[in-house]
Image (cartoon, rainbow, N blue to C red):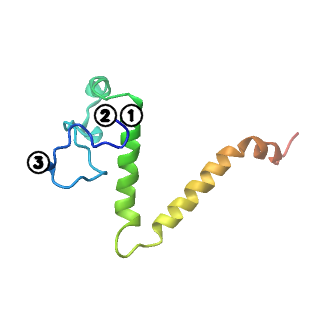
Amino acid sequence: MAFGDYPKEYNPSVHGPYDPARYYGKPDTPFSQVKIAELGAWFGRRNKSPSAFMGACSRAWWRWQHKYMQPKRVGIAPFFQLLVGSMTVFYVFNYGKLKHHRNYKYH
């Protein structure tokens, strides 16, 4: 699969219009329904390639877009999610500088 092409499992005559938030591969047991004894086999069936990881990130992004950003009446939730996410990222980036400014009772 080249960059920007449809997934090889996608068939327009079967699936209809392409949805970037949908996984077109063979369905598997959802993670929430996996028993502890089956966990190793479940992880073994996962595709661990970089393209599979990027595809999963892309599907998650489009699901978030369809749920929060693209409805007709968008609420304030996506803006607060982006705000909290950016605050968390910048806190992690600056943690090395911030940890030296802690106030301790005993030195």
* Residue depicted at x 38% and y 49%: 60
Q: Is residue 76 above or below residue 22?
A: below
Viewer-nearest of discs 3 and 2:
2
Mark 2 neighbour density, 10 Å: few (under 14) some (14–19) many (20 or more):
few
Q: Secondary structure at mark 2?
A: loop
In this orientation, does residue 104 appear? no
For residue 27, above or below residue 38 = below
Distance between mark 1 and mark 3 Cα atoms: 24 Å
User: Which label is found at residue 1?
Assistant: 2
Specify the quadrant that holds the C terminus.
top right
Q: In the image, residue 74 lies at what x, y percent?
A: 41, 73
Question: For the view shown, which residue lies furthest in the bottom direction?
Answer: 73
* Marks 1 and 2 in Cβ contact (< 8 Å): yes
Mark 2 residue type:
Met
In primary-sequence order, the first of circles 1 and 3 is 3
Per the image, the residue denoted by label 1 is 51
Question: What's the amino acid at mark 1?
Answer: Ser
- Which quarter of the image is occupied by the N terminus? top left
- On the rendered structure, is 107 left or right of 61? right
- Kindly state the secondary structure of the residue where label 1 is placed: helix
Q: Answer with mark 3 or mark 2, whichever residue precedes in sequence.
A: 2
Q: Quickly name the residue at label 3.
A: 14
Q: List the single residue furthest toward the left.
A: 13
Q: CA distance from mark 1 to mark 2?
A: 9 Å
Q: Residue at x 78, y 44 (%)?
A: 97
Residue 107 located left or right of residue 28: right
Task: Please tell me whether residue 66 is drawn above or below residue 33 in the rendered image.
Answer: below
